[in-house]
Image (cartoon, rainbow, N blue to C red):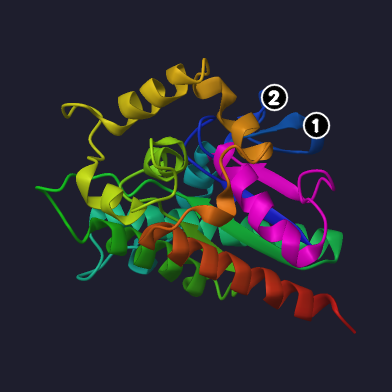
């Protein structure tokens, strides 16, 4: 099986080391969100996707390039505004790449699309669900059954703060409402995460290693947005196992 992943940048899903927009194996520098995916999948499949070079990366730019060719009638409408149409089309593009990759390798594939929910408490409270539904809708539009939205609320820093705060993993659900997804707000999530890392003599460059060595335990994070992602990821992983068994 192959997991095809895409995110917003090096600090979440990761990036290619070789300057390309798609990569795998040693050319893929996995970010903390990719390692979280790996940590959750490994107990189910009994091996590391990253170590097995079974995780492949597609950049946001690649998805946008492919999505340009999609008819607007399939991406926009009365129930889908311009912003959510962007996530819908991105999911369609990633699903198409994952399917083609599976056909070439003759194996089952999954697609994981990472996007922060963003927004603020004072703005659109339903933004998280809109983005989740839009990504899910894009996978469905491509008739791709192994798609996984990865939408931290309000953003990935909240999931990481859950593990690093003074009382790790406790009452983390409140972070989804207490933190702002706006980087220009007072005391933004990014600064809070950096402050916690500084107490450990670490910085954001160390995030992947902290997940990999279980300092940040993916299995202990308990937040609604994380659990929704985890449940879908595990469902898709088990579906892939079923597809590959005789």
- Report the front residue among 225 and 18: 225
Residue under label 1:
26
The region drawn magenta spans 32-59
Which residue is rendered at x = 82% and y = 66% of the image? Answer: 107
Q: Is residue 49 magenta?
A: yes
State the mark number for residue 197.
Answer: none
* Residue at the outermost right position: 246
Q: Position of residue 171 (x, y in %)?
A: 33, 53
* Left or right: 47 as drawn, with respect to 33: right
Is the C-beta separation of discs 1 and 2 under 8 Å? yes
* Left or right: 17 as drawn, with respect to 142: right
Which residue is rendered at x = 50% and y = 20% of the image? Answer: 200
**Visible residue check, residue 33:** yes
Tell me the element at label 2: loop
Q: Position of residue 138 (x, y in %)?
A: 45, 66
Which residue is rendered at x = 39% and y = 54% of the image? Answer: 87
* Left or right: 71 as drawn, with respect to 97: left
Along the polypeptide, which appears first: circle 1 or circle 2?
2
């Amino acid at each position: 099986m192959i997991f095809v992943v895409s995110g917003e940048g090096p600090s979440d899903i990761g990036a290619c080391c070789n300057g390309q927009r798609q990569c795998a194996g040693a050319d893929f520098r996995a970010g903390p969100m990719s390692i979280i995916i790996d940590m959750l999948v490994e107990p189910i499949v009994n091996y590391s996707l990253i170590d097995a070079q079974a995780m492949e990366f597609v950049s946001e730019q690649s998805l946008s390039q492919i999505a340009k060719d999609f008819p607007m009638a399939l991406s926009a409408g009365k129930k889908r505004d311009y912003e959510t149409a962007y996530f819908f089309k991105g999911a369609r593009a990633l699903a198409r790449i994952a399917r083609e990759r599976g056909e070439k390798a003759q194996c089952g594939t999954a697609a994981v699309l990472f996007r922060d929910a963003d927004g603020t408490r004072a703005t659109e409270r339903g933004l998280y669900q809109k983005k989740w539904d839009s990504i899910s809708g894009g996978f469905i539009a491509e008739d791709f059954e192994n798609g996984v939205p990865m939408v931290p609320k309000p953003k990935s820093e909240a999931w990481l703060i859950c593990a690093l705060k003074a009382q790790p993993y406790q009452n983390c659900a409140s972070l989804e409402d207490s933190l702002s997804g706006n980087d220009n707000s007072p005391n933004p999530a990014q600064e809070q995460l950096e402050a916690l890392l500084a107490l450990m003599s670490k910085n954001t460059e160390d995030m992947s290693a902290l997940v990999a060595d279980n300092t940040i335990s993916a299995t202990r994070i308990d937040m609604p947005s994380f659990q929704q992602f985890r449940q879908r990821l595990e469902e898709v992983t088990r579906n892939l196992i079923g597809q590959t068994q005789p």
